[in-house]
């Protein structure tokens, strides 16, 4: 099943943070403007969302492009192991 990964990007005094991750099942993934990964089901999507929240909780970025690229790389890499 394909899941679209989405999140909030928020500015802060120490840099841009990412949080409030969601994985939504989709039949029309947006690979250009977003992050879509193939997962086994709801349990795997919940696990990926937890991993994203844990990994990015304290991480800060200087710009939104870096944040997007890091989230995308993390989601794709970790979806392969679920």
Image (cartoon, grey):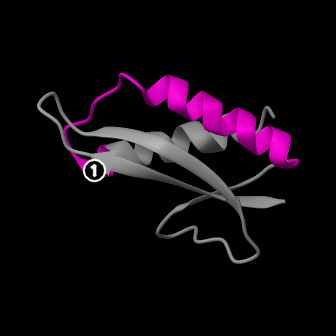
Quadrant into which the C terminus falls: top right
Q: Residue at x 30, y 52 (%)?
A: 65
Q: State the image coordinates of residue 69 (x, y, percent, origin top left).
A: 42, 47
Which residue corresponds to mark 1?
64
Q: Residue at x 11, y 31 (%)?
A: 13
Observer-nearest residue: 43 or 34? 43
Q: State the image coordinates of residue 50 (x, y, percent, origin top left).
A: 63, 31
Residue furthest out toward the front: 20
Quadrant into which the N terminus falls: bottom right
Residue furthest out toward the right: 40
Q: Is residue 51 left or right of residue 47?
A: left
Observer-nearest residue: 47 or 28? 47
Query: Can you say whether 67 is above or below 59 in the image?
Result: below
Q: Is residue 2 magenta?
A: no
Q: What main secondary structure does the magenta stretch of the protein show?
A: helix
Q: State the image coordinates of residue 6 (x, y, percent, origin top left).
A: 52, 55
Number of marks in the image? Answer: 1
Residue furthest out toward the bottom: 28
Instruction: Give the quadrant of residue 81.
Output: top right
Q: Residue at x 24, y 39 (%)?
A: 16
Q: Residue at x 46, y 69 (%)?
A: 33
Q: Is residue 60 left or right of residue 19?
A: left
- Find the magenta span and give its range: 40-66
Query: Can you say whether 24 is above or below 43 in the image?
Result: below
Instruction: Give the quadrant of residue 15.
Output: top left
Q: Is residue 44 left or right of residue 17?
A: right
How packed is label 1: few (under 14 Cα within 10 Å), some, or many (20 or more)? some
Observer-nearest residue: 42 or 78? 42
Dot 1: element: helix
Q: State the image coordinates of residue 7 (x, y, percent, origin top left).
A: 46, 51
């Amino acid at each position: 099943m394909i899941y679209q990964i989405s999140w909030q990007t928020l500015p802060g005094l120490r840099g841009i943070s990412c949080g409030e991750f969601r994985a939504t099942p989709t039949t029309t993934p947006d690979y250009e403007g977003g992050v879509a990964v193939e997962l086994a089901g709801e349990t795997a999507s919940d696990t990926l969302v937890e991993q994203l929240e844990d990994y990015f909780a304290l991480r800060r970025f200087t710009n939104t492009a870096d944040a997007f690229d890091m989230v995308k790389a993390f989601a794709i890499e970790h979806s392969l192991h679920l």
